[in-house]
Image (cartoon, rainbow, N blue to C red):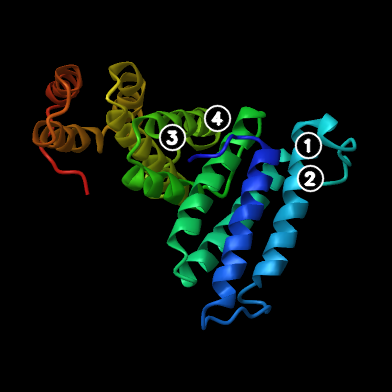
């Protein structure tokens, strides 16, 4: 299940995941060094707890005391929590805790939504993009796919001012490209044309070099997997308008 996009919900779910990781660590042969290269699980847990509390106070003053204006703003706090969650996800994968890593991907997306829905922006987008792609590949329940679409849609809309129009070949452009493609893939999997159209329009407008190949592959997939007629027709319309002749890699 994807968690609600609220600091308290993220914190509560994170505690459950960390408890499971600590249990997995106890039963494994993996070591857990606390050095400059790899922070220990308890240290990461404490840092995340503190950062999420600060984020909660920044977004909802009623969550606790009024935020200290000397503390980092919403954008920097968001990037800090993204970094900590990405490091924790890496530790989970080192412990072969696949279920917990999957849950942490959901927490990364919820955190990004939480920031952008509150008017903030993120600069450190790579872990968020990776989480969106991972969840898109593994999500199977139609209701959760729909939730995933709305999360990635909110993230893309909230970050468009920062990332849209980035110069091709830059890291910023690559992150934006991958996010828009993931959103379009997730939109297709919702089987809802009303969600697919805005995601497809963004590909045409912002990624004209990638759009034809995306719709060509979409035509192949919708035919092979027997998608509903309305979905196939929408994909065909975008494919025909773009003159797709390349496969998206």
Measure the C-alpha gap from mark 3 to mark 2.
Answer: 26 Å
211 relative to 103, above or below: above
99 relative to 7, above or below: below
> Residue at horizontal 78%, vertical 37%?
58
**Of discs 1 and 3, which sits in the foreground?**
3
In contact (CB < 8 Å): disc 1 and disc 2? yes
Residue highlighted by disc 3: 148
Q: Is residue 83 visible in the rendered structure shown here?
A: no
Q: Secondary structure at mark 4?
A: helix
> Residue at horizontal 49%, vertical 32%?
151
Measure the C-alpha gap from mark 4 to mark 3.
Answer: 15 Å
Q: Secondary structure at mark 2?
A: helix
94 relative to 73, above or below: below
In contact (CB < 8 Å): disc 1 and disc 3? no
**Of discs 1 and 4, which sits in the foreground?**
1
Mark 1 or mark 3: which comes first in sequence?
A: 1
Residue highlighted by disc 2: 54
> Residue at horizontal 51%, vertical 65%?
92
Q: Secondary structure at mark 1?
A: helix
Residue highlighted by disc 4: 158
Q: Quadrant for residue 194, please give it.
A: top left
* Mark 1 Cα shell of 10 Å, populated few (<14), some (14-19), many (≥20): many
Mark 4 or mark 3: which comes first in sequence?
A: 3
């Amino acid at each position: 299940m994807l968690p609600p996009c609220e600091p308290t919900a993220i914190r509560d779910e994170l505690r459950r995941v960390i408890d499971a990781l600590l249990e997995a660590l106890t039963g494994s042969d993996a070591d857990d060094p606390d050095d400059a290269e790899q922070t220990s699980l308890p240290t990461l847990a404490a840092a995340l707890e503190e950062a999420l509390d600060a984020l909660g106070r920044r977004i909802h003053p009623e969550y606790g005391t009024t935020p200290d204006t000397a503390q980092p703003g919403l954008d920097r706090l968001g990037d800090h929590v993204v970094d900590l969650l990405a490091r924790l996800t890496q530790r989970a994968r080192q412990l072969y805790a696949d279920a917990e890593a999957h849950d942490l991907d959901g927490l990364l997306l919820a955190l990004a939504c939480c920031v952008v829905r509150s008017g903030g922006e993120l600069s450190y987008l790579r872990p968020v993009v990776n989480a969106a792609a991972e969840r898109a590949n593994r999500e199977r329940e139609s209701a959760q796919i729909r939730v995933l679409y709305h999360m990635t849609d909110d993230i893309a809309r909230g970050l468009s001012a920062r990332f849209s129009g980035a110069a091709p070949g830059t890291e910023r452009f690559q992150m934006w490209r991958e996010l828009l493609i993931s959103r379009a893939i997730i939109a297709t999997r919702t089987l809802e044309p009303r969600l697919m159209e805005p995601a497809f329009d963004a590909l045409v407008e912002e990624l004209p070099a990638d759009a034809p190949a995306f719709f060509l592959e979409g035509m192949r997939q919708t035919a092979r997997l027997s998608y509903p007629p309305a979905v196939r027709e929408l994909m065909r319309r975008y494919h025909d308008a773009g003159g797709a002749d390349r496969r998206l890699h």
